[in-house]
Image (tube, coloured by chain):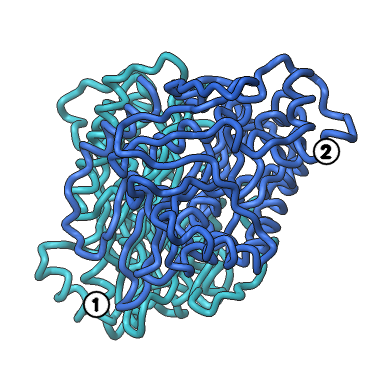
Chain colours: A blue, B cyan
Amino acid sequence: MKERDLIAAISERAAPATNSSLLYGIGDDCAVTQKDSKNVLLYSMDTLIESVHFDCAWHPPELLGRKAVAVNVSDIAAMGGTPQFILFSLGLPPGFDENWALKLSDGVVDGCNQYDCTLIGGDTVASPTGVSISLTVIGEMAADLVLYRHGARAGDIIYVSGPLGRAAAGLELFKRGLGDRDEFGDFYRAHLDPKARTDLGKILSSSGLVHSMMDLSDGLATDLAHICRRSKLGAVLYRQQLPFDAVLEDVAALVDMESLKLIIGGGEDYELLLTVPPHATKKLQEVVAQSGDLLYPVGRMTAGMGVTLVQADLQNNTQEIPIEFLGFDHFTMR
Amino acid sequence: MKERDLIAAISERAAPATNSSLLYGIGDDCAVTQKDSKNVLLYSMDTLIESVHFDCAWHPPELLGRKAVAVNVSDIAAMGGTPQFILFSLGLPPGFDENWALKLSDGVVDGCNQYDCTLIGGDTVASPTGVSISLTVIGEMAADLVLYRHGARAGDIIYVSGPLGRAAAGLELFKRGLGDRDEFGDFYRAHLDPKARTDLGKILSSSGLVHSMMDLSDGLATDLAHICRRSKLGAVLYRQQLPFDAVLEDVAALVDMESLKLIIGGGEDYELLLTVPPHATKKLQEVVAQSGDLLYPVGRMTAGMGVTLVQADLQNNTQEIPIEFLGFDHFTMR
């Protein structure tokens, strides 16, 4: 049983909401509830487990704490909201290193400061065989600006907010003991210390020009499939439009992986994935450029089902390949 | 380093709130934030780890799921609030039993229904060596009715809302392979399937007669010490007033433990612990009696520091014993 199957089963079991203030439950980056006449609250929870989501051998505790916050806050960014509060539950094995635990906590607090949110609670528990870190993040935004996964329409242009595959490449380097090369600093940082795109998320939701949005946590292929499923649409990705990164090609060769696999299958980019109606793209690019950000068009939503990759060969003949979901599955040990 | 020391260290590290809607952060059963002009939101998060907080050998998954909800909802009851939403993060080991996971999820949903709250999100992750269950609960209540730990005053009468030590006794029976005796059914149930006192909590907060409140999760000795510390007071417990339970005496003899240790040191009762000014006790007992509930007076808040147990011998000579904290520490493996 895969993660998504289990989540689907749990979701089916969840009773229909009897609470009228629930606007959206399981199935998006955040749950959404009505706060008052104008605003909604956003909720998300993520757990990081030692040896599954992180390896203490190369992950300094301060950065791990900050990453735990960024990963959660990214779900708020994915709706276009503002993070406000964090709850932090820490499981520690017997005989844990106190300094390590305090540095991790410093990282969590630092992450909270970075995104201007406040640590308001949580707990610490014994965890027999390894560290576990669960966070809940609470955010807020205007009710009429929330961006869901299900809002895409056929013909929408698909954008990503930055280069892809760097975090996955950084992880592959660490796994192979190649964690100390100056030229790959961006890739190490992408894995160890990702940034949530909260500022850009707010710009995008406020623009009123975006149809659907989510964050890239499991890789473009998997995450775009979520937008497709929720929007009952398909999508085409254009190989030649995926952000090109010469150093990523070097890393891919070094770790003996296809760069494409890192780019569309690599998780933990924490960039935003969004769809925009064609008539609004120019205006949106202008809005985004004002903050110094860039959006990369990578494909188009289609009326069909499934995600297809279109790539051209040297003779400019195009080839259409249905994408099997190459993203990480959380139940697969990395 | 003990759990409370680590929490204190994390709490010190947490930056002072820059968010004016935060009314109370780390240090009580729930964090409290302003929702609107009349109401506040309550947040709590708790994690249960296999072989620390539960043992699959005797804990049926449906009851474990329901317990995970009750344990979290109990923190809302402790403030006098109404639970509304649950987030549920489930860590599962490789090759986990699908049926078991689905039954656990059924239990979580059942627990949500029981307390009239809705499961709105969470995640599932791989957890290499055992099951971990993190829940976040979100509640709501009128801003002027919130009951904190820090509200106790010297002279207040200390009450508990039910018999104590049953869950701890049930656990001791299971640990000794004595989990199948009809006469101990209440004790097994107290451990496997505790109930959060949400209805009583609301009656108590609405009464306006209570000074401080919390739930009994770590044992009366430990939990009362929290009220003392937060209220900058001491407390006296009267041994002869602690709810007497003849069957508990039998269990204590059978498992070769002092019954007192189960009663004031045993965790997971999930009853309410509250302090009430003497002039209000009669009125409060009447209010509570209307719902068929009972409150048991067990002691008194004092101007000094520390918790003292007063017990009388057969000649009615009283003896005062400073209580070392006998409650479970979450960092101690059970």
Q: Residue at x 48, y 31 (%)?
A: A221
Q: In what quadrant of the picture does the N terminus of chain A appear?
A: top left
Q: Quadrant of residue A244?
A: top right
* Disc 1: which residue: B206
Query: Does residue B321 show up?
Result: no
As drawn, A168 above or below B34 = above
Mark 1 crowdedness (10 Å alpha carbons): few <14, some 14-19, many ≥20: some
| Quarter of the picture holding the C terminus of chain A | top right
Residue at 27%, 39% in the rendered image: A11
Could you say where residue A219 lies in the image, as x and y percent from the top left? Answer: 54, 34
Residue B274 vs residue A291, the one in the foreground: A291
Q: Residue at x 68, y 17 (%)?
A: A257
Rendered view: A156 above or below A239: below
User: What chain letter is assigned to the residue under label 1?
Assistant: B
Q: Secondary structure at mark 2?
A: helix
**Mark 2 and 1 residues: CB-CB less than 8 Å, in contact?**
no
